[in-house]
């Protein structure tokens, strides 16, 4: 007899994650007019702001850095790519369960006016993409003398 551990909250967590993904796709599609439903999965990201830069760190395991496209247009940073399914020559792949998602991904971020679009850099290592967006030097107010 096979015993299975009962975890009552795992189904709720899965439902919440799926609803978040659907909502994120709907909001992103409404913002840019594109069909984001073609995106099969969405990499998790951390966004950090320091005094001199913004840093976006995305978990993209299984995707080589040269397979990731990072673009900047009209104040919107876009990260696109695709994680391909591992194929084997054997007839039966031997999998009993597949939970990892494969396919294309697509994320867009609207950058603030303080971001320096000309100095953005991106690097990937060990399945983690890091995009660094420096801030522009703040313009100092100019004092204008009033003559009499």
Image: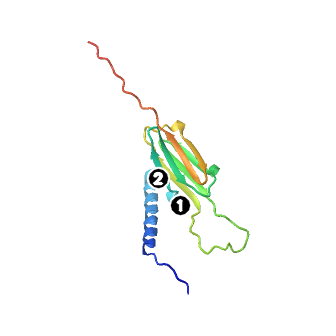
The percent position of residue 69, horizontal first and vertical second, equals: 59, 48
Q: Which residue is drawn at 42% across and 66% down?
A: 16
The 10 Å Cα crowd at callout 2, few under 14, some 14 to 19, many 20 or more, is few
Q: Residue at x 33, y 20 (%)?
A: 144
Task: Pick whichever, 81 or 128, lies toward us.
Answer: 128
- 79 left or right of 51 in image: right
Q: Which mark is residue 41?
A: 1
Residue placed furthest toward the bottom: 1
Residue placed furthest toward the top: 148
Residue placed furthest toward the right: 89
Q: Name the residue under label 2.
A: 33
Task: Pick whichever, 12 or 104, lies toward us.
Answer: 12
The percent position of residue 56, horizontal first and vertical second, equals: 50, 48
Please say if 115 is above or below 60: above
Earlier sequence position, callout 2 versus callout 1:
2
The percent position of residue 10, horizontal first and vertical second, equals: 45, 71
Q: What element carries label 2?
A: loop
Colouring scheme applied when the structure was drawn:
rainbow
Q: Residue at x 54, y 40 (%)?
A: 120
The 10 Å Cα crowd at callout 1, few under 14, some 14 to 19, many 20 or more, is some
The percent position of residue 117, horizontal first and vertical second, equals: 51, 38
């Amino acid at each position: 007899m096979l015993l299975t551990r009962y975890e009552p909250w795992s189904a709720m967590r899965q439902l919440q994650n799926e609803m978040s993904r659907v909502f994120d796709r709907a909001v992103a599609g409404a913002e840019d007019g594109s069909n984001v439903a073609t995106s099969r999965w969405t990499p998790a990201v951390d966004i950090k702001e320091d005094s001199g830069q913004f840093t976006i760190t995305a978990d993209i395991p299984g995707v080589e850095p040269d397979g990731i496209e990072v673009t900047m247009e009209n104040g919107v940073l876009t990260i696109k790519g695709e994680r391909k399914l591992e194929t084997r020559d054997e007839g039966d792949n031997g999998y009993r369960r597949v939970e990892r998602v494969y396919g294309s991904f697509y994320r867009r971020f609207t950058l603030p006016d303080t971001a320096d679009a000309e100095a953005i850099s991106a690097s990937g290592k060990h399945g983690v993409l890091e995009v660094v967006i420096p801030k522009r030097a703040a313009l100092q107010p100019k004092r204008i003398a009033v003559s009499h």
